[in-house]
Image (spheres, helix red, strand yellow):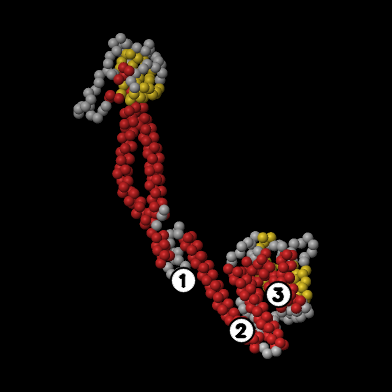
């Protein structure tokens, strides 16, 4: 069901309910006012009749009947005395004075006040008034039908015009709802006709206040989609650029293997081809890890990190390279009772992060040296004995596919980029510089300002 039809349905249901409640209170208030008016008249009528009663008048035995006013005609105006009754009794309950309808009113002793009774099958409102000497009792009554007729007449006089205007009101409400939803219809039409590549923000200045949060969320979504597309385009362009050279090298090395004339030349060419395949495998693995880290789609970031298991896995992955280059791997833990870098995160991604840090430290450390992984309460450090990096290289570390000139070992230039992105997802920041003694290279991970 459309929003417009839903609003109209709510209005059609709620309007009669509100009118019904208003009508109930209107009838209730009108009945109160009518009762107040006619009760006052009954009291005054009883008091006037009581005032006319003198000593010895009327005689109980005569039971005079009060004259009836002519009904109809100009002399009577719009009065209707058929629903009024007056009766007088003496102290013994003998009827002394009554009009035609008053003959049926019951005697109530020395009671004074209002009461509702059934008189000849009809509900009446009666007021009894006893004289001060107790000799007479006067009753003035009125049929409740007269009061109900007046109440319903006043109510219908208000309801009928509303009922007659109801069709016009429904048309006006339908127009108002459609007019009020016009900005939403315009937004729908604009989005339906917008090109898939058009991710410009929707204007919010002229939008109604209720639509601005929706437009803000949509514009934020457009920005995230645009950033995602930019990352995908950049990744595709970088991948095409970086894979072109290794593939060409592999093809050339394969040609050398096929054309080798002696077993020694063939073994040398096969070793170079194997090294090229390893470099290609490392490049693809690093590119996939970077793409997964930059996508922001992380399955679980609320796992308590078990650093010993991550260190064991990461060092195991780097052990072959460290053995080949005669690098000693060491890990220093904090003092007993102190938890190393307590945090929540994704163990798989942190394993990738630590493996890349150790791999870089082992790959670019001098042969026969040591690489030390050191944990603290709020940081971890990876040190090697490599030559200090110049400032211009430190500034560019972390750029995708950046590798300084003259590196003896092959790499993809993605390791530091992956480390920085995973660290950012976990509220960490990476700082690379020299050790405290001014020698070697130290990579330090610590909580950023927002999580420190």
Q: Residue at x 71, y 62 (%)?
A: 306
Residue 361: % across, % down: 72, 76
Local secondary structure at mark 2: helix
**In front: 52, or 172?**
172
Q: Which quadrant of the structure image shows residue 375?
A: bottom right
Q: Please name the residue that numbered disc 1 is placed on.
A: 197
| Whole-number angstrom distance, CA of label 3 to CA of label 1 | 40 Å
Q: Nearer the viewer, mark 2 or mark 1?
A: 2
Badge count: 3
Mark 3 Cα-neighbour bin, 10 Å: few <14, some 14–19, many ≥20: many
| Whole-number angstrom distance, CA of label 2 to CA of label 1 | 38 Å
**In front: 19, or 326?**
326
Q: Please name the residue that numbered disc 3 is placed on.
A: 359
Residue farthest right in this picture: 336
Residue 105: % across, % down: 34, 18
Residue 240: % across, % down: 56, 79
Q: Please name the residue that numbered disc 2 is placed on.
A: 251
Task: Say whether residue 32 is left or right of residue 313.
Answer: left
Residue 399: % across, % down: 62, 77
Task: Say whether residue 144 is left or right of residue 261.
Answer: left
């Amino acid at each position: 069901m459309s929003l417009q039809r839903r609003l109209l349905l709510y209005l059609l249901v709620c309007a009669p309910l509100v009118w019904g409640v208003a009508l109930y209170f209107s009838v209730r208030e009108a009945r109160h006012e009518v009762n107040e008016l006619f009760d006052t008249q009954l009291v005054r009528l009883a008091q006037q009749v009581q005032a006319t009663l003198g000593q010895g008048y009327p005689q109980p035995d005569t039971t005079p009947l009060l004259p009836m006013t002519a009904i109809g005609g100009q002399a009577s105006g719009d009065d209707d005395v058929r629903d009024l009754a007056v009766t007088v009794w003496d102290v013994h309950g003998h009827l002394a004075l009554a009009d035609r309808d008053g003959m049926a009113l019951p005697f109530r002793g020395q009671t004074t006040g209002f009461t509702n009774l059934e008189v000849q099958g009809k509900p009446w409102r009666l007021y009894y008034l006893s004289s001060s000497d107790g000799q007479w009792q006067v009753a003035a009554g009125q049929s409740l039908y007269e009061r109900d007729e007046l109440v319903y007449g006043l109510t219908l006089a208000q309801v009928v015009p509303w009922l007659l205007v109801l069709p016009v009101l429904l048309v006006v409400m339908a127009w108002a709802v459609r007019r009020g939803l016009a900005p939403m219809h315009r937004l729908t039409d604009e989005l339906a006709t917008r090109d898939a590549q058009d991710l410009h923000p929707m204007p919010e200045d002229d939008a109604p206040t209720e639509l601005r949060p929706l437009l803000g969320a949509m514009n934020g979504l457009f920005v995230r989609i645009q950033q995602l597309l930019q990352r995908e385009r950049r990744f595709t362009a970088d991948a095409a650029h970086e894979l072109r050279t290794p593939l060409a090298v592999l093809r050339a090395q394969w040609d050398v293997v096929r054309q080798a004339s002696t077993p020694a030349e063939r073994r040398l060419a096969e070793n170079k081809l194997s090294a090229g395949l390893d470099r290609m495998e490392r490049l693809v693995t690093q590119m996939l890890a970077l793409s997964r880290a930059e996508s922001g789609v992380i399955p679980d970031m609320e796992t308590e990190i078990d650093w010993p298991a991550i260190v064991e896995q990461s060092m195991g992955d780097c052990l072959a390279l460290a053995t080949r280059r005669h690098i000693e791997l060491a890990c220093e833990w904090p003092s007993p009772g102190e938890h190393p870098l307590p945090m929540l995160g994704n163990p798989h991604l942190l394993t990738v992060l630590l493996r890349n840090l150790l791999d870089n430290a082992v790959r670019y450390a001098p042969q026969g040296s040591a690489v030390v992984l050191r944990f603290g309460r709020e940081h971890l450090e990876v040190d090697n004995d490599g030559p200090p990096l110049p400032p211009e290289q430190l500034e560019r570390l972390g750029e995708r596919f950046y590798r300084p000139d003259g590196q003896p070992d092959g790499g993809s230039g993605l390791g530091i980029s992956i480390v920085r992105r995973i660290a950012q997802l976990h509220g960490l920041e990476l700082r690379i510089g020299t050790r405290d003694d001014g020698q070697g290279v130290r990579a330090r991970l610590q909580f950023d300002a927002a999580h420190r």
